[in-house]
Image (cartoon, rainbow, N blue to C red):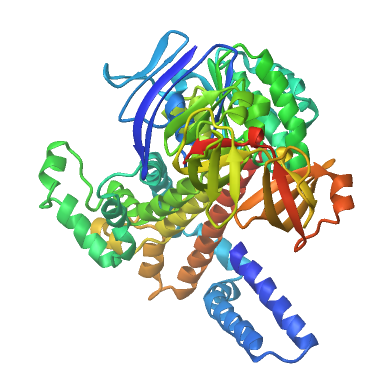
Amino acid sequence: MSRAAGSARRISRAAGSARGRRPSWFGALLALALAVALTFLTLPVVAIFVHSSPGELLAALGDPAARDALRLSIETTTIAIAAILLVGTPAAYLLATRAFRGRALVVTLVELPLVLPPAVAGIGLLAALGPNGLLGGALQDAGIQLVLQTAGVVVALIFVAAPFHLRAAQAAFAAVDRRWLEASRTLGAGEARTFARVAVPAALPGLGAGLALAWGRALGEFGATLMFAGSFRGITQTAPLAIYADFATDFDGALALSAVLVAVSGALLLSTKLLTHDALARA
Amino acid sequence: MLSLALEAQVGALRLDLALAVADGECLALAGPSGAGKTSVLRAVAGLLTPARGRVVCGGETWLDTAARVELAPERRRCGYVFQDYALFGHLSAWRNVAYGLPRELARRERRTAAIALLERFGMAALADARPATLSGGERQRVALARALAARPRALLLDEPLAALDARSAAAAGRELAVLLRELQVPAILVTHDFAEAALLGDAVAVLDAGRIVQRGSAAELAAAPASAFVADLTGAVVLRGRARRDAEGLTRVLLDGGGEVVALAAHAESGDVAVAVHPWEIALEPAGSAPAGSARNRLEVEVTSVTALGNRVRVGLAAPQPLAAELTGASAARLGLAPGARAVASWKAAATRVLPR
């Protein structure tokens, strides 16, 4: 986001200096391309807020179905993100700092869900963890029921969102100066302490960006959740599913819920970025 | 006492050497880049595992590949000052230093102890500064304070002055020399600069392609280099040619590219050799001047460069092999030396050493 703003500033400067001398058709072309992209990408978001007045937003929040959906979205994404952080961060650290045979293959495999169509992800989850799936029997024996359950929503969210965090965290750890890690070891810190005290704090902005991306992706998750967990109000109907269920019958209500979801996503993204930057400034 | 014997393959380089450094002694490991200097430090610190080797410090075995002993870096407690200092960018100066302090220290004592260490290097006022805002010299002092905070059993310094500009390097070098004299632990300092090795090392070991080719005091190395490689490293002029013994018992060396040099060689060298002479032994005379005085070696030369170094001038010459003479500024001005000028370079046979190539 800040990068886009930066390039916009740079382009306007280029256009400005071009105006001083002679009109540069290329500078104008770049500015035009950005203007088109910006308009196209922000128009739907702007339209949502133009359509729903603050009063309608509040009314939408008053609707119990919408409230359930929002609550469920926030709960499931929070659990999913916690699991992603807990397992994904050390895994990304390993991928970023150790060389081993087949590393490139492992990296590709963990990023695979990024390019899977959501419907394929849903089918895959059913085939793996559904009642007749690969691990279905084992899960059943353990008394774990995922399909059509809130737990299933969390599993679907983790599956689609984790690669975003893994990828960003891996890049962030790879960018940490190797010598910092070595210096930490010579100063008496073991591997675990070096990870916690040097690698994670040094990679924090990148980790925060990955977290925000993964969270945003989890909040918007639709296809895999629908196929794997279904759309039952209060149990598996997250906000995107509720919007889909509503929009044919109650377009204004769906619109208002969308506006709330945009606001929540935006707030999460912003606070994640602010928090990681603050933590860095305080250290 | 730190003693080590290593055999390791690092990329294309084969490292094979043994060293011993006494408590309180600083060994300067000198050599060109790619000679394996940093790899030696890494192996001592435990950041590199050699194929075969033994590292013993203060009676404790850190590494013994034969006995399958290998202590992790954090258990060896080496004070390692990295070439670019490797200060943690996300921590302030005092927190960088406190990172190395023994962990049993209470939270409140850590800051006090870290500031006390920074104070020793004149850095207490900048305790809260981030490394990115510090100058090269300031970073070096924080890095030293941090290395000492862990009460190291050996100190390893990788090109500690290389990241500094000439003026801060001179000041930092003097401070470092004082510190190294005070320290009671063995220290190894890595440098590509012989002058730095001479200033900071009690002894100098010259490393070439993974092997130690000569070890001695800096004065010994400069006076009696064992090879053309060592002579070149000490800053001597090294000329290549073919040697033969003459009737007087002198060694005559016919230089590659023309010219002849006479030397008083202790033992007969013949065939392909190098001759070494220090730049300050070489006198310059106007071109075409008649031989006068005792200097037996006279070469027609062309001036290629004139560089002022403090109160002296280093004159680059081509004969046609490159050599250099060092004169006072006044002499250089009197002779009117400028690139392109012609002159005669002369020095005594007794100042000329013949070395194997």
Residue B289: % across, % down:
79, 53
Residue shown at the point (73%, 57%) measured from the top left: B303
Residue B23: % across, % down:
56, 11
Quick one: B155 or A232, which is closer to the camera?
B155
- The answer to whether B342 appears left or right of B29 in the picture is right
Residue B215 in view, yes or no: yes
- The answer to whether B49 appears left or right of A9 in the picture is left
Residue A44: % across, % down:
52, 76
Residue shown at the point (26%, 19%) measured from the top left: B66
Residue A31: % across, % down:
63, 83
Residue A67 in view, yes or no: no
Quick one: A11 or B147, which is closer to the camera?
B147
In this picture, is A34 found above or below B3?
A: below
Residue shown at the point (49%, 64%) measured from the top left: A257
Quick one: B350 or A214, which is closer to the camera?
B350
Residue shown at the point (53%, 12%) measured from the top left: B22
Residue farthest along the top direction in this orientation: B59
